[in-house]
Image (cartoon, rainbow, N blue to C red):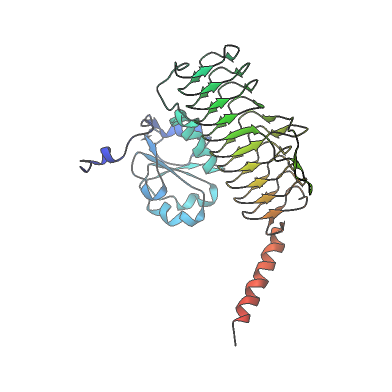
Amino acid sequence: MTEPSNQSEMSPVFFPEAQTITIKQVAEWAGAEIVRGDRELTISGVAPLDEGVPGTLVFIDNPKYLDQLEGTKATACLVSKKHLEKVPEGVVPLLAKEPYRSLAKVLAELYPDAMRPLPVTRETSVSLRAYVEESAKLGEGVVVEAGAVIGADVVIGAGSRIGPNAVIAANCQLGESCSIGANASLQHSVLGDRVIIHPNVSLGQDGFGFAMGPGGHIKVPQLGRVVLGNDVEIGAGSCIDRGANRDTTVGDGTKIDNQVQVGHNVNIGKHCVIVSQVGISGSSTLEDYVVLGGQAGVSGHVRIGMGAQVAGVSAVHDDLAPGGRYGGVPARPIREWFKEMTVLRRLTSQSGKK
């Protein structure tokens, strides 16, 4: 096998180079203040602190990386007030209340195509190799790639993209500017605007409902839907079951990571964050702004209050109060859990001594 002759052959370009912009423009996009330096200097990219070179923008938010900040060669740095004095001479400090959020705003302007999944192919309309029922209604500018199946009476809003081999079953409704990834499956589902569904997601399949007994388990018909609000994002390989006797719902702005299971009748509020491999059992409720760490489990029929945060690999068996931080098995207030872990470590270390 012939080795690549240069670095450009080894590193394919998935996004075009960003436009060259002035520090003044960066500050406007970021909502930041130029503390010192030439506002007409330009940047053409974003880099990690330790890879910052002239012409790039960096940011500092975590004190763990202050040593990298002191050595960066970047042109400008988004920084909060508490780290402002650490920005070296020659680097333009851009004072921001929340540097990471400010960086996100700048990146959205520099790389608009990265804000939603791009089509896999160069298709610009409905592929001749897609199957679309005659009764389906597709809005202006909808892209349907090869192998996709669009069922009867489906409604897809303007500007939406349907990836290869995705299946959208009869009567589903999608809002405007939605993105449905390759091999995704949607049935009994209603989506708002700007919803992003990554590859291999399943929405609206049967909930896991059975009337159990010694004579065998009787399947309970699942008659509800999955309803997603605006700006919801569902990560690759995740599954959301439709409700049994009511809808399974996900509120506006909620972000769900890869490989998450959401059971039937679950209600997830607005702007929640659910990290990978979480499992949420049926009929539980997450109020707005709840955060669940990776591999956390939520039992059925519990309520997690607004703004509560649950550490990874925790198990929620009972209702949790709003605004609290919880961890452990079973989940309990985080300080209580830390104290218990400290005592356990002390006991186990002592048990090994003679």
Position in image of residue 337 (x %, y %): 69, 63
- Choose between 79 and 338: the one closer to the eye: 338
Q: Write the residue at 62% across / 44% down.
A: 274
* Residue 241 higher or lower than 152, as above or below: below
Q: Residue furthest front?
A: 215
Q: Write the residue at 60% across / 78% down.
A: 349
Q: Quadrant of the C terminus?
A: bottom right
Position in image of residue 292 (x %, y %): 64, 48
167 to the left or right of 92: right
- Choose between 59 and 209: the one closer to the eye: 209
Position in image of residue 223 (x %, y %): 74, 30
Q: Quadrant of residue 41?
A: top left
Q: Residue furthest bottom?
A: 354
237 to the left or right of 325: left
* Residue 93 higher or lower than 176, as above or below: below
311 to the left or right of 286: left
Q: Quadrant of the N terminus?
A: top left
- Choose between 128 and 22: the one closer to the eye: 128
Residue 27 in sight from this viewpoint: no
Q: Write the residue at 60% across / 30% down.
A: 231
Position in image of residue 222 (x %, y %): 73, 33
